[in-house]
Structure formats: C-alpha cells, structure tokens
Image (cartoon, rainbow, N blue to C red):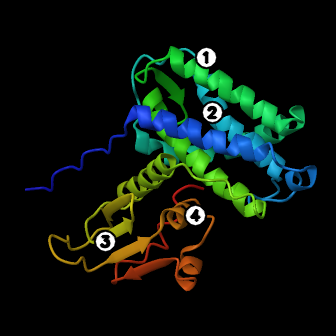
C-alpha cells in the first residue's frame, strides 16, 4: 500500500492577518528612526540600499492591495506551496520597482504608513476566500497572506543585518508561519521520510528519499533555529557556513541539505 498523502498544513487566518500587521508595524516604526546616513547604507541584497529595501518591504502589503484591485479569477489554480517556486521570475521587476518607490517617496515612514492604511482597509472589505491572480496562480487571500509573513520576516532580517543596532523585533506568529511555509517547501521539493528536519519550536518535517523512519531516534536529523533556517532557505547563509559556525547540526548520511538549498532565489 502506498504511503498516505500528507495533508497540507493549515494556518489560522485571523492570526496570520494579525501577524502580518504586527511585523509590518515593527518595520514601519524602525524605518521612522533611520538617519539619512543609515538609509544610504548598503545591504546584502546586491546593490540595494537600506532605503531601497525599506521601499520594497512596503511592496509586501502593496502587492495585496494591487491584486485586490484586479478582477477576481474564476477559480483557484494554485496552492500555497506553489508560491516559493514562482517568485524567482519576478525578481528583476521587483528590484526596479523598489528603487522607483524609494526615489518617489523621500519620507519612507509616511509611505509605509499609507501602505498600511490602504492594506488594512482592503482587508476589512474582502473575505479570506477572495481569489487573487498571483504569479503562483490564483490563490485565496488567506493563503497569499501567509506568503507575506515570509517577505516581512526575511526582509526584517535583511534590515537588521544592514543597520547595526536597529534590532527590529520579530512577531512570534509571523516568524512561526514563515518558518513552517519554508519547511514545508523543503519537504515538497525533496519528498521522502529518511531525514527529519527540526526547527524548534515551530516546525518538524520529514524529507529526502530513502529508508523511512518509523520509531525511535531518526537516523538522519537536521536541527537549527528559525532565523538560521530562514537564512538558509533564502540563500542569506550557505549550508557550509552554517555548519562551520555551528548554527545547524546534521547527523546521518542523508542529512546534507546543501544540494537542496536555497529554496528561494
């Protein structure tokens, strides 16, 4: 008998909406404290400055507003786990748009506050079942909002890395959802049950083809913390560097995830 198909993870829509707004609020408040010198600092995202990055973070919610302004697709054609694979094709357009927004909005804190107001208003007007025509196909608003936690957590980490002492906090629910979505992406990309990936306290997934673990201690185990996992999944940290710096532990012959990462490019 073939193994039972894994049930897709579900997320509490109310908690996701709260988490998205909380994390965006954390970023907005921090951007309001940036000096001109800090806004001009480089980031780890190629030639993006902190100002460009802050403008791009506004796009995480602005994209929802834009998609809600478009006609609703007739039926759902994508699932949540299609999103991580689809976003790479949008990268060139995203970079150009972020720089344009940064140039057109010298007061970035005011710009982010305006984006937040429009986003909040549109959320109040639309049910979570409303379909959006995303790059990953037609997804429900509830599902698309889960992807916003990834965008916000990843770029919060980018801002913290670029500006010493900024220390933007991470909303717990946003960090949990981002961790789980990227963990499930790995499991979908490398299906199997030979390796257990643990990201306490938020996620445990089985992946990689090979002998399936059924009881006791798994023969192949990877464990790391949520932020390190997110950095690995998005290419901010390499597998080798994370191992060398003891940010991740890996035991067993099938515990090398280096060839599967990053998940987002």
* Residue wearing tag 2: 61
Q: Position of residue 152 (x, y in %)?
A: 61, 46
What distance separates the C-alpha of mark 1 from that of mark 4? Answer: 33 Å
Q: Identify the image quadrant of the N terminus.
A: bottom left
Above or below for 251 versus 208: below
* Label ID, residue 263: none
What distance separates the C-alpha of mark 3 from that of mark 1? Answer: 43 Å
Above or below for 162 versus 219: above
Residue 95: in sight, yes or no? no
Q: Quadrant of residue 237?
A: bottom right
- Indicate left or right for 81 with 156 as reference: left
Residue found at x 83% / y 47%: 51
Mark 1 near mark 2, Cβ–Cβ under 8 Å?
no
Residue found at x 46% / y 37%: 16
Q: Position of residue 76 (x, y in %)?
A: 39, 26
Mark 3 near mark 2, Cβ–Cβ under 8 Å?
no
Point out the tag, 1 or 4, that comes first from the N-terminus.
1
Residue found at x 41% / y 59%: 186
Residue found at x 63% / y 33%: 61
Q: Position of residue 256 (x, y in %)?
A: 42, 77
What distance separates the C-alpha of mark 4 from that of mark 2? Answer: 22 Å
Q: Nearer the viewer, residue 166 or 213?
A: 166
What distance separates the C-alpha of mark 4 from that of mark 3? Answer: 20 Å
Q: Nearer the viewer, residue 234 or 85?
A: 234
Point out the tag, 4 or 3, that comes first from the N-terminus.
3
Mark 3 near mark 1, Cβ–Cβ under 8 Å?
no
Q: Identify the image quadrant of the C terminus.
A: bottom right
* Residue wearing tag 1: 69
* Residue wearing tag 4: 231
Near mark 4 (Cα within 10 A), the count class, few <14, some 14-19 or many ≥20, is some
């Amino acid at each position: 008998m073939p193994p039972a198909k894994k049930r897709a993870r579900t997320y509490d829509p109310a908690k996701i909406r709260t988490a998205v707004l909380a994390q965006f609020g954390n970023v907005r408040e921090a951007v309001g404290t940036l000096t001109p010198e800090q806004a001009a600092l480089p980031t780890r995202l190629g030639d993006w400055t902190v100002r460009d990055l802050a403008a791009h973070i506004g796009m995480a919610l602005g994209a929802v507003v834009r998609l809600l302004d478009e006609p609703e697709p007739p039926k759902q054609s994508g699932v949540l786990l299609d999103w991580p694979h689809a976003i790479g094709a949008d990268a060139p357009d995203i970079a150009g748009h972020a720089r344009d927004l940064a140039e057109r909005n010298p007061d970035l804190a005011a710009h982010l506050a305006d984006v937040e107001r429009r986003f909040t208003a549109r959320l109040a007007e639309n049910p979570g079942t409303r379909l959006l025509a995303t790059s990953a196909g037609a997804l429900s608003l509830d599902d698309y909002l889960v992807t916003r936690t990834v965008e916000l957590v990843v770029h919060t980490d980018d801002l913290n890395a670029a500006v010493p002492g900024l220390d933007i906090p991470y909303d717990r629910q946003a960090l949990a959802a981002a961790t789980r979505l990227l963990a499930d992406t790995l499991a979908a990309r490398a299906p199997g049950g030979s390796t257990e990936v643990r990201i306490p306290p938020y996620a445990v997934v089985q992946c990689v083809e090979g002998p399936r673990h059924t009881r006791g201690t798994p023969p192949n185990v990877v464990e790391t913390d949520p932020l390190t996992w997110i950095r690995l999944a998005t290419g901010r940290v390499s597998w080798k560097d994370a191992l060398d710096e003891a940010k991740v532990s890996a035991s067993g012959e099938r515990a090398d995830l280096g060839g599967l990462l990053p998940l987002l490019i």
